[in-house]
Amino acid sequence: MHVFKAAVIGAGTMGGEIAQLIANAGLPVVLKDVEQRFVDQGLDRAREVTKGQLDGLVAKEKLTQDEADARLEEVLGRIEGATDYSGIGDVDFVIEAAPERIEIKQQVFGELDERTPGHAILASNTSSLSITEMAEATLRPDRVVGFHFFYPASVMPLVEVIAGELTSRETITAAINFARAIRKQPIACGEVPGFVVNRILNSAVGEVWRAQEEGGLSIKAIDEGVTAQNVAPMGPFVLADMLGLDTILHVAQHLRESYGERFYEHEGMRRLVEQGKLGAKSGGDGFYKDGEPQVEGDGEPDSERLAELFSLKALVECCLILEEGVASAKDIDLGMMAGAGLDPRRGLFPPLMRADFTGLDVVLERLEGAEAEHGERFAPPRILRRLVAQGRFGQRVGQGFFAYPQPDEGEQPETVQLETRGDVAIAWLMHPPMNSLSPSVIGDLMTVWERVKAADELRAMLICSSIPFVFCAGADIKAFTQLDEDSGSEFVVNAQKMLSEFGDGDVVTIAAVNGLAFGGGCEVAMACDMRIAAESAAFGQPEINLGIIPGFGGTQRLPRLVGPEKALEMNLVGDEITASEAFERGLANQVVPDHELFDSALGWARKLAGQAPLALAAIKRVSNAPHLDKGLADEMAAFAEVFQTEDAREGIGAFLGKRKPRWTGK
Ligand code: NAD
């Protein structure tokens, strides 16, 4: 599924900016509304946003004014305003951003189904309505998907890609690829009220709203106090004024109706909305007017406690989302970073990572306390109890919702570090933000690999990422361009040699793929004997998009794993595939929930580390013969060789004696 042209239906608050994003990414887009004046408003907004961005580039001297002027017209020239459907007969992807009423959405989806090509994906930017019900208005429910931007769409990086009951996996993959193509951060989730980010935010902020009304607290003191506690980028009442009280109230009511008591509806907000006081959009009159609070309450809040309740409740909701299978741990935290402005670089950690850093045992105790004080809505979720029961306390022990390195003592390379657990070595990729493979990362991986090979007791090596959101996003192209031709080619030869050894030697190699494995990252994973993937992992060879080709075995190992046709397609198109497709195609050996990845991969490593060493090495060696006759000849020779070993006698003896064998590698 490839997108050459798109359409946006509804040119309001969201539509104009969404069309701008698409045009800015180089694609033609039709922007349709019911009346020309609405279309014009959308076009004006697209111009304003583009101009703002280009002015920024001129100010930073990245563009001249003339270049910026030309770019502005180029981008806007790709947006075709319309009040009818005549321009959408050849679109591939449509985003509906019409008013939030199911009867309007269904009518629009019926019309789109009649007028767009059968292959086109019909997406909705709805915040709360059912994708499945919209799909019912079409003959292509498998190609209807939620595509939820956050306000303002030109600034907020997140898109929630929502699967309706009948949405196909291909549609989800295509929507994720399209979101990336327009430079947004997609997360995948199921169709539940509030999806992921609004649900978590509302659940958490509801505790602050509740405390404000029950305790008659000052909203100004709350906004200042909560911001200072580093749980959110801005205070909840200031934020509501910015986003529009009517929008916030609508979502809050919807979530309370859907989930009940654990969500809260702020009475004061409801009264303000009744009076037409909506915040910035009603001339700055909302919770505040001219900086002064407009709701009663002058009590001094215990900001630390409020911030703690906010964090605890956010965590409860995250766990419920995980338990319901709505989204993965990684997508939940990524969603909160890209959709709620939580930026770890500013000390604002997303909920699951934050809990891992605090200690899940500590958090569980705090939740039990909050439950005793405030009731069931703070009841510790089962998934948290389970992790604590397993001793997965978070960062300080190396495992919680995510896995964290605990490198061995002594000198370590900087970007890849070795951790030893019994007979299993773990090579941690530690090169933020994307674990890109620079020459020094490859050099450090080589150092670790040499250590692993040299240690007789190490029988398996896991390759893991220390960054919860990415396995390895590929080669560090900039660093490579700085190598001269000789050192460049020597480097590639050495790297290729190491990757070949991953598949040939007597150490089992396993990639624990937690997130994106693109380009060089995918190639490192493919060079390993096995790949265990987290549900939200993705694989791809996007080199062609840079006008280059894979250089660490992508054209050779990929066909051996997924078959020549699919490999050729992936290498020629450059799009990513999901973990589940990777599993079906043979690229991943197993797909597991994100938070179980490390344990599962370690389990595989332990199992294989315990196998007969000579037999294991022989099987690896003969398995990749270039053709059948050579392979059979190799196998015959290896069979005869292995059959003569002490391990073979031990294995057969143990089998006949009904006891566990003890391998010596002789
Ligand atoms: P809006 O009211 O600002 O714009 C909707 C536009 O759709 C209007 O210009 C209207 O004239 C037009 N329209 C009405 N019927 C139409 C039809 N049949 N065909 C084409 N256009 C039609 O609304 P908005 O805030 O842009 O919201 C649009 C969608 O995006 C809603 O589903 C909303 O829930 C969702 N959303 C909004 C926000 C937000 O903060 N505003 C954030 C995320 C998602």
Image (spheres, rainbow, N blue to C red):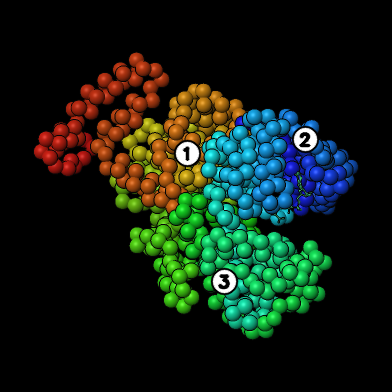
Q: Position of residue 201 (x, y in %)?
A: 59, 62
Numbered circle sitting on residue 207:
3
Q: Nearer the viewer, residue 483 or 659?
A: 659
Using a 10 Å C-alpha cutoff, classify the residue at mark 1 as few (fewer than 14 neighbours), some (14 to 19) or many (20 or more).
Answer: many
| Of 368 and 124, the residue lying toward us | 124
Is 662 situated above or below 324? above
Q: Secondary structure at mark 3?
A: helix
For marks 3 and 1, give the one nearer the viewer: 3
Q: Disc 3, disc 1: CB below 8 Å?
A: no
Residue 483 in which image quadrant: top right
The image shows residue 637 at horizontal and vertical percentages of: 26, 21
Which residue lies under the disc numbered 1? 580
Distance from the alpha carbon under mark 2 to that under mark 3: 46 Å
The circle drawn on residue 85 is 2
Amino acid type at image mark 3: Glu
- N-terminal of the pair, mark 2 or mark 3, is 2
Residue type at the position of mark 2: Tyr
- Is residue 475 among what the camera can see? no
Helix, strand or loop under label 2:
loop
State the CA–CA distance, disc 3 to disc 1.
Answer: 37 Å
Count neighbours of disc 2 (C-alpha within 10 A) and say few if under 14, some if 14 to 19, many if 20 or more.
Answer: some
Residue at 63 percent across and 39 percent down: it is 137
Residue 113, labelled with which disc? none
Q: Earlier in the sequence, mark 2 or mark 1?
A: 2
Left or right of 150 on screen, residue 541: left
Circle 1: residue type: Ser
Foreground: disc 2 or disc 3:
2
Q: Is residue 108 left or right of residue 231?
A: right
The spot of residue 532 in percent (x, y) is: 42, 42
The outermost residue toward the top is: 629
